[in-house]
Each structure stands twice: as structure tokens, then as C-alpha cells.
Image (tube, rainbow, N blue to C red):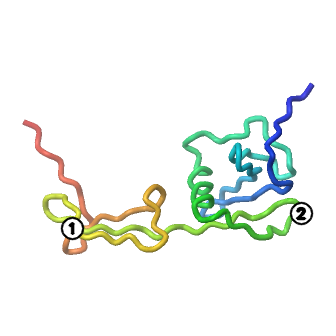
Amino acid sequence: MIPHICTFSDPEDFRIANASGKLVWFFDWSDRFGPSLTNGKGDILPDPWPSERSPFWRVFHLWLRQGKRWGPSGVKGIRAAIWDEPPPGHYVVDQRGVIIETNEPEGFDSDYTPVEFVNEDGSPYRRRRKARP
């Protein structure tokens, strides 16, 4: 007997890709159980969840936080998950390493947005290590 998982999900799967479009995942979405990876034909994979370090989770959580937008994918039974790369944050740091100016543009996501630290003169900030005694 083959075990089955009942996820109470939509009949159509989602297709999501990373920012470069080189990594693509198909998944089934359930409000109760979350995402389960599929083969793109509606069948849930034997190991339906990627590892916790998989790049899938970053794009999935950005899609989720941005309102689960979707559009047609051109393939019957598959919806394209639409998400936007958040703008980078920009922080100005003084000589002591204290942030003195913060620029977090609209759409900034504290968990998934790349950040840039610069000195007051605009050069990249490099953290100075304390000398060992």
C-alpha cells in the first residue's frame, strides 16, 4: 500500500524560481501544512520538504510575506509564484562601529534583504577586531 498525504490544498501546484531563474521548485501549498514539493505533475515527492539551508526557503518566505501573488505559468495545472527581490538596506557606521544613519527602503525585509554597511565617507565598512592581549 502506498501512503498518501492529504494536505487540504489547492488543485493547482505552484512554480517558484530564485532571482536568477536557474533554480526552480514546484510545490503544493496548504494553509494548514505549508509547502510540499511536487514533481510538477501534482504528485508530492517522497521527501516533500527541502533541507533547512535550501535556497527554496528564502524565495518561498519572500513570496509568502509579499502576499502569495501568482500568475499563469503557461502550463496547465501550474501557477507561477510571483515575488520581488527586496531592495538592500544601507547603513552608515561611525569610527566606533555604531550605526548613525539607517536607510531601509519600502519593501525592506529584515530577515531576507541584503544589507550594506559603509563608513561616513561612503567607503565599505570593515569591522576592526580588537587586539588580543
Q: Secondary structure at mark 2?
A: loop
Q: Nearer the viewer, residue 101 or 39?
A: 101
Residue 3 placement: quadrant? top right
Q: Which mark is residue 22?
A: none
Give the image location of residue 117, x and y in percent.
30, 64
Identified by mark 2, the residue type is Lys
Q: Nearer the viewer, residue 50 or 4?
A: 4
Residue at image point 26% right, 67% down: 118
Give the image location of residue 115, x and y in percent.
38, 63
Q: Secondary structure at mark 1?
A: strand
Q: Is residue 124 above or below residue 28?
A: below
Q: Is residue 21 left or right of residue 102?
A: right
Q: Is residue 15 left or right of residue 75?
A: left
Q: Label 1: which residue? A: 100
For label 1, the crowd category at 10 Å Cα-Cα, with few meaning under 14, some 14 to 19 and many 20 or more, is: few
For label 2, the crowd category at 10 Å Cα-Cα, with few meaning under 14, some 14 to 19 and many 20 or more, is: few
Quadrant of image for the N terminus: top right
Quadrant of image for the C terminus: top left
Q: Label 2: which residue? A: 76
Residue 84 placement: quadrant? bottom right
Residue at image point 70% right, 56% down: 24
Residue at image point 75% right, 64% down: 80
